[in-house]
Amino acid sequence: MRIAACLLMGLAFAAALQASALPEDVKTAVLSNPVSVHKGKQEFGRTCAMCHGSGGTGGVGKRLADRHLQPDYVFQTISNGLRRGASFMPSFGQKLSEQVRWELVAYIMSLGSGRQGGN
Ligand code: HEC
């Protein structure tokens, strides 16, 4: 009886692990890795800086440095793009891997809380 109960709990636990092994996994791994900020910075320079300015200081697209943007919101915006009035940001969901998109989030987060630029 006890063994059966343990087995059941083990199964439930395994199922729960599997359910959370989806995107959250990549997110947690990337955001907790210090190298991600550096990689995100490089990608930002290639792909985003022409609109958001080097170091996220703003241009055609809004300033991203020193804002208190939520990681999930930033990830969604990169993935799906954004239209705001006449302004338009293309979506990068097809062009950049999930990993790279989270690295960009890590970089943008590093520009917050009073830190300047990133250059
Ligand atoms: C073609 C120009 C362009 C490119 C390239 C671009 N963006 Fe944008 N981005 C915009 C515009 C325009 C907006 C919407 C208006 C605004 O918020 O400035 C926007 C909005 C955003 C927002 C939401 C800002 C807010 O205040 O809600 C984030 C985050 C963002 N961009 C990140 C990125 C990242 C990361 C990249 C590179 C993968 C990128 N953008 C590439 C033009 C661009």
Image: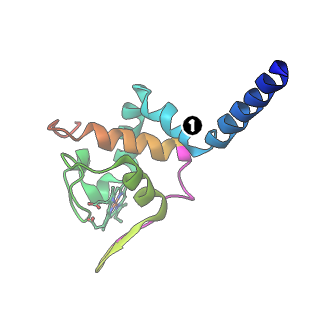
Q: Is residue 117 left or right of residue 32?
A: left
The kind of residue on which mark 1 rests is Asp
Q: Quadrant of residue 41?
A: top left
Mark 1, secondary structure of its residue = helix
* Relative height, residue 35 to residue 107 (above, below): above
- What residue is drawn where x is 37% and y is 33%? 37
Quadrant in which the N terminus is drawn: top right
Q: Is the stretch drawn in magenta largely helix, strand or loop?
A: loop
Residue at the farthest bottom position: 86
Q: Is mark 1 within 8 Å of ligand 1?
A: no
Is 92 contained in the magenta span? yes
Foreground of the two, 11 or 78: 11
List the residue tagged with mark 1: 25
Task: State which quadrant residue 95 falls in.
Answer: bottom right
- 25, above or below 71, in the image: above
**To which quarter of the image does residue 105 belong?**
top left
Give coordinates of residue 76: x percent, y percent. Answer: 44, 57
* Residue located at (57% from left, 59% from top): 94
Q: Which residues are magenta?
A: 88-98
Between 96 and 27, the one lying in front of the other is 27
Q: Given the current orientation, which residue lies at the most extreme top position?
A: 3
Q: Quadrant of the C terminus?
A: top left
Question: Ligand 1 shows up in which quadrant of the image?
Answer: bottom left
- Position of 9 with respect to 79 (left or right) is right
Q: Position of residue 10 (x, y in %)?
A: 74, 27
Front residue (pair 34, 69): 69
Residue at image coords 17%, 35%: 115
Taking the magenta stretch, the answer to whether it contains residue 100 is no
Q: Position of residue 92 (x, y in %)?
A: 49, 59
Residue at the (54%, 47%) spot, across then down: 98
